[in-house]
Image (tube, rainbow, N blue to C red):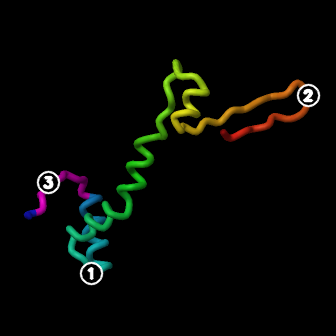
């Protein structure tokens, strides 16, 4: 199966950076881009897709039942604030 080709535009600075990295590592420019995607794409996806929150209409009990962790902070009448992870 032939790999798809995805043409991308980039700034001259980005192109120079890729070229320099290829020369430093002895890899082709295509391999530098592939390795960069392999290393940093999971982190990028995690940053761009924050942990989903349960809808406001959903009760705390329902959220816990469906396995969504929530943080609840209780402030007693006297003393310090205690954080309980459910």
Q: If you read the primary sequence from the N terminus, does the residue marked by circle 1 or circle 2 appear first?
A: 1
| Disc 1 secondary structure class | loop
| Disc 3 secondary structure class | loop
- Magenta highlight on residue 11: yes
Q: In the picture provided, is 20 more to the left or to the right than 44?
A: left
The label on residue 26 is: 1
Residue picked out by circle 2: 78
User: Which residue ends up furthest to the left in the rendered image?
Assistant: 2
Where residue 9 appears, as percent x and y from the top left, is: 19, 51
The label on residue 7 is: 3
Reply above or below: 35 against 81.
below
Where residue 11 appears, as percent x and y from the top left, is: 25, 53
67 vs 82, nearest the viewer: 67
- The 10 Å Cα crowd at callout 1, few under 14, some 14 to 19, many 20 or more, is few
Q: In the picture provided, is 1 more to the left or to the right than 63?
A: left
Is there a contact, CB below 8 Å, between mark 1 and mark 2? Answer: no
3 vs 16, nearest the viewer: 3
- The 10 Å Cα crowd at callout 3, few under 14, some 14 to 19, many 20 or more, is few
| Disc 2 secondary structure class | loop
Count the labels in the image: 3
Where residue 85 appears, as percent x and y from the top left, is: 68, 41
Point out the image quarter for the N terminus.
bottom left
Q: CA distance from mark 1 to mark 2?
A: 65 Å
Reply above or below: 73 against 7.
above
64 vs 27, nearest the viewer: 64
Q: If you read the primary sequence from the N terminus, does the residue marked by circle 3 or circle 2 appear first?
A: 3
Tell me the mark number nearer the camera, choosing from 3 and 2.
Answer: 2
Tell me which residue sits at (47%, 35%) in the image.
Answer: 52
Tell me which residue sits at (53%, 38%) in the image.
Answer: 67
34 vs 74, nearest the viewer: 74
Task: Name the main secondary structure of what is drawn in magenta.
Answer: loop
- Magenta highlight on residue 47: no
């Amino acid at each position: 199966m032939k790999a798809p080709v995805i043409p991308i535009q980039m700034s001259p600075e980005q192109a120079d950076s890729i070229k320099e990295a290829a020369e430093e590592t002895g890899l082709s420019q295509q391999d530098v881009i592939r390795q960069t995607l392999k290393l940093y794409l999971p982190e990028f996806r995690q940053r761009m897709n924050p942990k989903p929150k349960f809808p406001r209409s959903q009760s705390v009990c329902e959220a816990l039942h469906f396995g969504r962790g929530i943080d609840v902070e209780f402030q007693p009448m006297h003393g310090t604030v205690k954080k309980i992870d459910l």
